[in-house]
Image: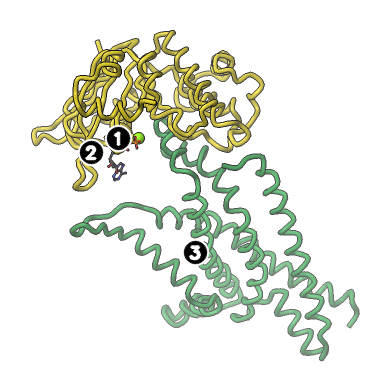
Chain colours: A green, B yellow
Amino acid sequence: MSFVSLMSQLGEGFIATLQVFFLTLLGALPLGLVVAFLRMNHLGFHIGKRKIRPISLITQFYISVMRGTPLMLQLLVVYFAPYYVFGMQLSDTSRFTAVIIAFILNYAAYYAEIYRSGIQGVPKGQYEAAEVLGYTRSQTFFRIIFPQMVKRILPPMTNEIVTLIKDTSLAFAVGFVEMFTVARSISNSQRSLMAFFAAAIIYYVANLLIAWIMGRFEKKLSYYHD
Amino acid sequence: MSIVSLEHIHKSYGDNPVLRDISISVDKGEVVGIIGPSGGGKSTLLRCATLLEHFDSGSLTYDDIVVAKNDAQGKAEYAGKDAIKRAKSKFGLVFQNFNLFSHYTVMRNITEPPQVVQGRSKDEVYAQAKKLISQMGLEGKEDMVPCDLSGGQQQRVAIARALCMNPEILYFDEPTSALDPELTQEVLRVIRGLADQHMTMVIVTHEMNFARDVADRVVFMDGGVIVEEGPAKQVIEHPQKKRTQDFLRTYEG
Ligand SMILES: Nc1ncnc2c1ncn2[C@@H]1O[C@H](COP(=O)(O)OP(=O)(O)OP(=O)(O)O)[C@@H](O)[C@H]1O
Ligand SMILES: [Mg+2]
């Protein structure tokens, strides 16, 4: 197999990889913020001196399950649930849908914890200053807290995004064809490691690019610190 | 008529009573100094007056706006959103730790709140901010961020930020306690300037000379009660109560 045809086959797989990557980000970045808010929610009731916060507790449980069980297992559960639970027929689109749903649910849990530590890192005095000045809660969040949170979460976010690119390879577990799956089948039929090396280079370059872009953002926000 | 009036304020944290039947009111143009030992409830009183904390019982009024008053059971009942919003426009608060918005420049710290909260025009707010910046001696610092300023400069920005909202009364909670002695003086000078312009102020401070010279009235708080109050000179130079005398003795050379 020529180098050109190897790269064009891997390239097609990489497009599928990028689809999973971007759709996961598109879903998990905002969902993670919602999850972080639910997690920090104070709504609850008292039993004696203890305050029980049901929404926060349920969210904490969700986060710990997502982080405490393998993504591959979650992927299989999401993929097979419609068949075993509802008796629905599985198709190619259901593979893709399952991958996206599982990835979004899993990554939202990780992002939520990153958001939470970013939000809680903003000095409490700034909330109070905004409150006394008369900012509403949403004004305080979007103008004062959110921009400072973004600066704080960039380094851990970079890690998670790099991990996400690599994790897309787990989609092979439900038979979704992305770059890793392509590389494996080429390698099997060619009886050579060439395809794996080529795929590794593509993953690696993609991650260098991500790290570079995130570094630019960090630099842009380095004009202040607390 | 008083700008703010707090009556029979009680406030506990859990089982710990922090304010025990505090009543205080401040007239227009008056400067009130609050002094007292650590843990006496000074900050809590300011936080109740600025609505950062709710008290358990008592009443709070700004001009003609009743912010909170006792219900039939004798528990404080707070007014609705609208009244709270109007009351908030009456006061400003300067914190011990400045609490400037770290990601904003000096100019934006001062000019954003009036535009966002009061809906005022950018041109008008900027014109006022420029005057305040020169009044605070901060010319040339407009485009700097708080982390590049000294503590004294940050505190002066915080004062300008509060003043740009045109409050009727300004509260200070130990505005110089986080500052080195040299920087303390520049902030005290600014506050003194405001007193000369008859700005209504309530200042919690450990600077006894400053309180004596700048305040019209001094209130000594200890253990959640007002132990003694009166004209500044009289309370600081000739305190009547033993607790006040003991406290002030710790400040003498
Ligand atoms: N959020 C809180 N939760 C529980 N207790 C609190 C809280 N804030 C203050 N207290 C307690 O209330 C009491 C009064 O505190 P406060 O901060 O009002 O005193 P202060 O007079 O301002 O003292 P300082 O001169 O040290 O600033 C203290 O015993 C303090 O421990
Ligand atoms: Mg205090």
Disc 3 under 8 Å from ligand 1? The reply is no
Name the residue at 24% across, 59% down.
A50
**Label 2, label 3: how many angstroms apart (C-alpha)?**
41 Å
Q: Amino acid at mark 1?
A: Thr
Answer yes or no: is residue B89 visible. no
Name the residue at 37% across, 53% down.
A41
Pinpoint the chain carrying mark 3.
A
The mark lying in front, picked from 1 and 3, is 1
Q: Which residue is mark 2?
A: B18
Ligand 2 is in which quadrant of the figure? top left
Residue B44, labelled with which disc? Answer: 1
Total numbered labels: 3
Disc 2 under 8 Å from ligand 1? The reply is yes
* Left or right of B20 on screen, residue B174: right
Q: Secondary structure at mark 3?
A: helix
**Label 1, label 2: how many angstroms apart (C-alpha)?**
8 Å
Query: Which residue is at the front of the view, B235 or B27?
Result: B235
Decide: is B160 above or below A192: above
Q: Secondary structure at mark 1?
A: helix
Q: Are marks 1 and 2 in contact (CB under 8 Å)?
A: yes
Q: Position of residue B122 (x, y in %)?
A: 57, 20
* Left or right of B103 on screen, residue B199: left
Q: Position of residue A150 (x, y in %)?
A: 58, 48
Callouts 2 and 3 in the same chain: no
Q: Residue furthest left?
A: B72
**Which quadrant of the figure has residue B177?**
top left
Q: Amino acid at mark 3?
A: Ala
The mark lying in front, picked from 2 and 3, is 2
